[in-house]
Amino acid sequence: MNLEQKIEAILFFKGEPMSRKKLAEFLGVGQKEINEGLEKLKENLKSRGIVLQEKENDITLGTAPEFSALIEKLQKEELNKELSKASLETLSIILYKNGVSRSLIDYIRGVNSSFTLRALSIRGLIEKNIDPEDNRRYIYHPTFELLSFMGVKSVQELPDYELVNNSIESASQNLAEELKNETDA
């Protein structure tokens, strides 16, 4: 397996932008090799429906511009569909926690939530901001549009807010303890 295939697999799996530096660290190669791998990947994707998108030093996979009308049609269809069970679970965690990392969402749900988070973001129900404590990860929040749609002025008005928030906080503490134990081991 060559470097460009590894980069493509990582970007596909992550489903969100990743820095060149992080790619280099993860793959154990230098910046020069990453840049060469990205150039080869760009070239290989030219005749496909996927492109490599770049913004500053962040890289992600996206759809080719010539398919924007097709993707827009699909997106409109997605927006009109009912939310899946996975989307509702993820949305509930984000609403009740009002600022949560993907790792905590994944821990609570027991599965990778990347695609669900992307779908909720596309629908305008959640937004992601860089974590002020660790600029390598994002924190997901409900949008004002979602709160407005639900008819609440703040997340504290959600049903059983204290009870649900406390159980999410407990899961958060369990995750922190597991991570600490892994690092201590």
Image (cartoon, grey):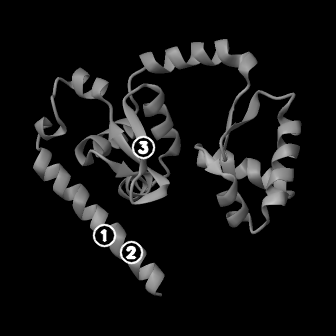
- Of the image marks 2 and 3, the number of the one nearer the N terminus: 3
The residue beneath circle 2 is 178
* In the image: residue 179, left or right of residue 55: left
Image mark for residue 174:
1
The residue beneath circle 3 is 129
Q: Residue at x 28, y 62 (%)?
A: 171
Q: Nearer the viewer, mark 1 or mark 3?
A: 3
Q: Residue at x 70, y 53 (%)?
A: 20
63 above or below 158?
A: above
Mark 2 and mark 3: Cα distance apart in space: 25 Å
Crowding around mark 3 (Cα neighbors within 10 Å: few <14, some 14 to 19, many 20+) is: few
Look at the numbered disc 1 and give the secondary structure of its residue: helix
Q: Tags 2 and 1 in contact by the CB under 8 Å rule?
A: yes
Q: Position of residue 170 (x, y in %)?
A: 23, 64
Residue type, mark 3 in image: Asn
Residue type, mark 2 in image: Glu
Mark 2 and mark 1: Cα distance apart in space: 6 Å
- Of the image marks 1 and 3, the number of the one nearer the N terminus: 3
* In the image: residue 46, left or right of residue 17: right
Q: Quadrant of residue 34?
A: bottom right
125 above or below 107?
A: above
Look at the numbered disc 3 and give the secondary structure of its residue: strand
Which residue in the rendered view is the most extreme toward the bottom? Answer: 185
Q: Nearer the viewer, residue 172 or 111?
A: 172
